[in-house]
Image (cartoon, rainbow, N blue to C red):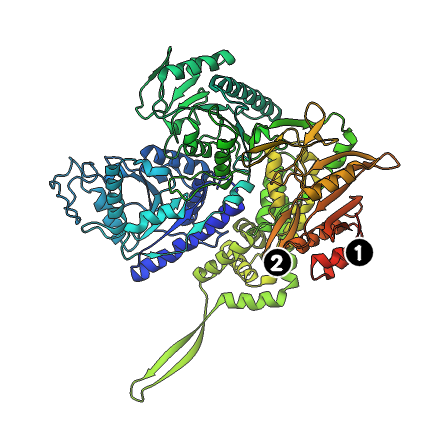
Amino acid sequence: MKFTLKDYQDDAVADVLANLGKARKRWHEDGDTHSFALSATTGAGKTVMAAAVFEALFGGDDDHDVDPDDGAAVLWFSDDPSLNEQTRYRLLEAADRIDWSDLVVVQNTFNQEEFSPGKVYFLNTQKLGKNSLLTRGHEAEDDGQEALPEIRPDGRTFTIWDTIRNTIENPDRTLYLVLDEAHRGMGSTGKKAKQARSTIVKRLINGTGTVPPMPIVWGISATIERFNAAMSVAEGRGTLPDVTVDAGQVQESGLLKDTVVLDIPDEAGQFDTVLLRRGTAKLREATEDWNAYAEAQGIEPIVPLLVLQVPNKPDHDDIGQALSVALEEWPELTPDAIAHVFGDHTAQTFGPFSIPHVAPERVQESSWLRVLIAKDAISTGWDCPRAEVMVSFRPAKDRTHITQLLGRMVRTPLARRIPGNEGLNAVDCLLPFFDTKTVTTVADALMHGASADADDDTPPVRRVLVNPIEVTPNPAVPDALWDVFLSLPSQSLPKRAAKPVKRLTALAHELAADGLRPDAGKLAHAELHKALDAARARYRDEIAVARQSVLEVEGKTLRADLENKTKTFDEFVADADHIVIEDAYRRAARLISADLARTYADHLADNATEADSDEDALLDAHADIAALGLVPDVKEYVDEEADELATKWLDEHRIDIKALSDERQDVYRQLRELSTEPQDVDLARPNEWLVPTKARHGDDETELPTYEHHLLAADDGTFPDDPNDWEQTVLATELARDNLVGWYRNPSRSSQDSLGIAYEHGDRVRTLRPDFLFFNQDGDGSISVSIVDPHGPHLGDALPKLHGLASYAADHPGLYRRIDAIAKVDDEFRVLDLTEKPVRDAIAAAADAPSLYQSEHAAPY
């Protein structure tokens, strides 16, 4: 894979491969057919996951312990040929073991006896219609429809149905059907169209005439319900557990924008042109911001797009007037930078402008395009991460159409967060015809994601802000305070599938690529060879027994005495041949990584006695490595050595890495986090936040209180916040201290400018994000920092969070003046300071959180 999979993607790939393996086994052994679904919200990276699955299916995968299916052929089916083409490009973009020739579009000229193994074939509904050249001449269907004449087009030997049948009936082939159901409507909106599609899908899944049922059906859908509805036409088919991607994990990954900003009028009136001007200004500002960021980072700039959403029956003169307003607001914008995606695919006249049509799937790559005119949800599978501003002229009653389109606009352009800059991590939507009351429904739909409506695959977003303001670094905050802030270690969550050896080799590759440690790959493997040599000495006896088991094959011979009607078993031992040894070697290589196994085998062979031939020396080396793989302590020992070396190199190059671009720093951040234990990661300096100025409670709005001395502030030096009762007490107490020089409302979202602390709750490691950081000036002029976190002691996660804070405090002694956990007990605020060892010891021994706050280890706050 060209991309490193996110944790949730890797988990989903593992589950999909497990299902495919079970389905394949049951098909070939018993002829049973099976289906299951992968449910993933828009923006989760379903094509990246599919690419990883196909690579493993065709070539095997050591990480997931999967052998290749040498007879695997994949049929990817959707209702839209342009969507298939888009998927094909993305698979090639993600996979490094799949070539362009392996991704075959089934054209009308397609003529093969069978689908070839190791290839993905793309087919759409129209190609299976009655009048398609691919089906012409096929036998009468079994559903009562009139048969077409048995006339095949010139030169055609096989219909597409022949190809499907021959592939399924070949015992050396496994045909996998991927039913791409992830997009609204699958391109069919009319009743007849839906019925026609249902009939085609039914034939494909259940078989038709002499064509047998599809052995394995893998559906990809935004909602399980949608796929299950499509699979209701299946007959006699077993089901495997569906694979569901958690939308919250997708949001945590940074693939989706964190914030949607909704701009609405503050008063009644006609404000479409006013907000269109504002939207155009936002487009211009986003362009300037991206250009500045790209120049600073040395990357190609993102070219942001404005989407002008109009009603289904728009007034073309009104659109023309709107375009004139946009061009007037930003003179550098020209009519040549405007296009539409209306369904009739022809140039449209809007006032004085003739605007061309553009295919939805080409919008992202058409960097000349800056303003796109659209109606409702644009199109099946439309995706454009550079769409950052939308002005919707649809009325308030069309809020569903608005949320669906916004759901297509929340993917981050660089597939990662921009550190410390919320403006570049947000999408703007301006709603001239909405008010505070009606915009609430849009906000709720966006924050909660897909509804029960099977046609709504809107992904959830973390925050929806209505008419927010921008806050930037407070000029009153001294530089020394920022130095302290940037020295604070945040913690990452451990990765379930982390492999220390692969992490080290990947780190070595990146360090060498950035010129930070030349020949790092050779150095890493040399150190791991030493570790394996040491393991061979340390576990000599266990390895000797394991090696003997590799070199000998034990079995039993059955002897049947027909006269006496008795049976006896004689045990035998035979020498293993090279096939058995190589199989055991491959299994061991999966444990320590194929690359390390290969280089260590060469290392052992090079140091073999001169009497051995090169071939014998290498076979002996493979037997040695196979034996290493049978001793669990060896892998654990090597993993520890690999982790230690990776951590050492990351620490040694920490300053050098911070001088790299954001993109390169993000690569190392992911490598640091790729560990089975929480890792310390650097905080990023926040440069721009978007914050609300009003609290919304139903139909009512109230102004938020503002506070001074926050690290980020508006132009007047204040920061609006919405603290609860306990937080108000904390703020009043801390801001009244004479030596306060600044404070920080720690973001509750997953971002690089948010301090996170790992803790265990249930069977998972989670992240605590303390509410506040307070900075005080000490008597010697230095600045110290304190964590202050009010949290209800009665809550189920109260004690686990205290354990996490205590562990963090113990791991970072002297870094904080105070780490205060605060709770209200009997109308009194009590505090546990976790920088004190007796308090940490009491937490370790406690049975519950409330008793701690009532003990002598807590003090009045």
Left or right: 302 as drawn, with respect to 108? right
Left or right: 857 as drawn, with respect to 281? right
Instruction: Please tell me which residue is depicted at 55% across the width and 60% down the height of the picture.
Output: 629
Left or right: 128 as drawn, with respect to 68? left
Q: Is residue 230 above or below residue 541?
A: above
Q: Is residue 131 above or below residue 676?
A: above
Could you say which is closer to the camera, residue 612 or residue 318? 318
**How much space separates mark 2 and mark 1, taking CA atoms?**
40 Å
Residue 372 on image: x %, y %:
42, 22
Say which label, 2 or 1, has the lower sequence index.
2
Whether residue 768 is visible here, answered yes or no, is yes
Left or right: 274 as drawn, with respect to 20? right
Whether residue 330 is visible here, answered yes or no, is no
Could you say which is closer to the camera, residue 65 or residue 746? 746
Q: Nearer the viewer, mark 2 or mark 1?
A: 1
Residue 304 on image: x %, y %:
50, 24
Few, some or many C-alpha atoms within 10 Å of disc 2 (few <14, some 14-19, many ≥20)?
A: some
What residue would you read off at disc 1? 857
Question: Secondary structure beneath disc 1?
Answer: loop
Q: Is residue 705 above or below residue 845?
A: above
Instruction: Please tell me which residue is depicted at 58% across the width and 67% down the height of the picture.
Output: 544
